[in-house]
Image: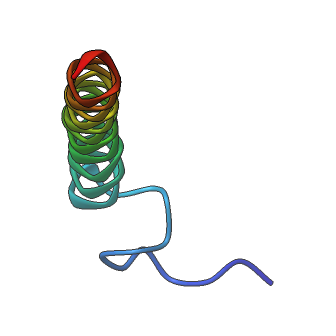
Amino acid sequence: MAPPPGPYSGKSSLALVARVSAFSFGVVYGSIKLKYLKAKKSRAEKHAAAEGHH
């Protein structure tokens, strides 16, 4: 028996909007975190290289 259409049944537009917004948030958060980690890594490498020359 199918569940009644509720906010998270997958049939209502609210569920679709919730899934799409959660997915979008995940993508945006992931890309920001990746950029942050790459910047942090490159800063650490530059710092280590600078210390190695002294």
Q: List x then y, in percent, for residue 16.
A: 33, 47
Q: Report the quarter where the N terminus lies.
A: bottom right
Relative to 47, is 27 on the left or the right?
right
Residue under the point 36% across and 79% down: 6
Figure check: 25 above or below 7: above
The residue lying furthest to the right in this view is 1
The residue lying furthest to the front in this view is 54
Residue under the point 45% across and 56% down: 11
Q: Report the quarter where the C terminus lies.
A: top left
Relative to 4, is 16 on the left or the right?
left
Q: List x then y, in percent, for residue 47.
A: 21, 30
Q: List x then y, in percent, for residue 32.
A: 19, 34
Total of numbered circles in the picture? 0
Q: List x then y, in percent, for residue 31.
A: 28, 28
Residue 24 location, quadrant: top left
Between 6 and 49, which is closer to the camera in this rendering?
49
Between 4 and 26, which is closer to the camera in this rendering?
26
Residue under the point 24% across and 30% down: 51
Residue 37 location, quadrant: top left
Figure check: 30 above or below 12: above
Residue under the point 30% across and 75% down: 7
